Amino acid sequence: GQNIDQPTEMTATEGAIVQINCTYQTSGFNGLFWYQQHAGEAPTFLSYNVLDGLEEKGRFSSFLSRSKGYSYLLLKELQMKDSASYLCAALDSNYQLIWGAGTKLIIKP
Amino acid sequence: IAGITQAPTSQILAAGRRMTLRCTQDMRHNAMYWYRQDLGLGLRLIHYSNTAGTTGKGEVPDGYSVSRANTDDFPLTLASAVPSQTSVYFCASSTNSGRATDEQFFGPGTRLTVL
């Protein structure tokens, strides 16, 4: 079956760095998305990786290893507004998105 | 309208009633999607449409129907609501059709409670 695994919840301190991991098992693979979702709001796009390596976008970076079925989202210089859920989603061979349950990130001052 | 809108924002519905959730986008996106989001589960695709006039079934289509008469609108209908359809429903759209490597833009969601 197809599956996305990511931690349910993580806690980090304002100003610190946090890494949110995601492992995926899909029938075929056409890329990996990360979305941010604040409580009670809609998901918003953060990143898309299809090739191995690190993509940096400001304070946020996303890494992909296709051979390991693994990705992570790295958040630097954490701010209170980064408190949110982070959703990992893999695009399978039929170009359907398979979503993880999300990682709730709690930022403490 | 700017982006993608959904109506109603929330609704409480008696079991057995028919309900249509509305979704409209003004970005001229080809592809549109309906998801449900339940606590502890990932977003699950209900139905999708790659272009106006075509629709397809997602992971959890039973009890739901959709239509795509034009580019902008993608309503989701629950023919006879059941309590297990209590959820938050998100509509989304993306520029691509078929090969969905573009980001999806989400509406604000509809919180539906079926009693």
Image: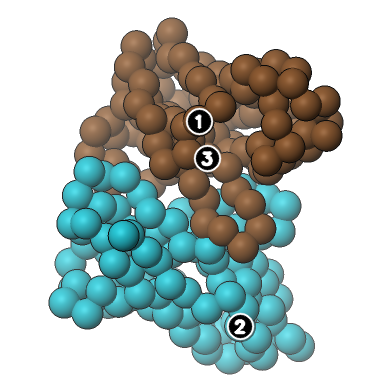
Chain colours: A cyan, B brown
- Residue B49 makes an appearance in the image: yes
- Mark 1–mark 3 distance (CA, rounded to whole Å): 13 Å
Asked if disc 3 and disc 2 are in contact, CB closer than 8 Å, the reply is no
Residue identifier under label 3? B35
As displayed, is residue A83 above or below residue B103?
Answer: below
The chain ID associated with circle 1 is B
Residue identifier under label 2? A10
Residue B40: horizontal and vertical position, in percent?
A: 61, 63
Residue identifier under label 1? B62
Residue B59: horizontal and vertical position, in percent?
A: 42, 41
- Mark 2–mark 1 distance (CA, rounded to whole Å): 34 Å
Residue B19: horizontal and vertical position, in percent?
A: 69, 19
The chain ID associated with circle 3 is B
Label 1 vs 3, first from the N-terminus: 3
Q: Which mark is residue A20?
A: none
What kind of residue is marked 1? Asp
Query: What secondary structure is marked by label 1?
Result: loop
Residue closest to the eye, B15 or A10:
B15
Task: Name which residue lies at 62% across and 78% down.
Answer: A9
Task: Name which residue lies at 34% across and 11% down.
Answer: B53
What kind of residue is marked 3? Tyr
Q: Residues within 10 Å of mark 2 (few under 14, many from 20)?
A: some
Q: Is residue B10 left or right of residue B30?
A: right
Residue closest to the eye, B74 or A93:
A93
Q: Is residue B71 left or right of residue B17?
A: left
- The quadrant the N terminus of chain B occupies is top right
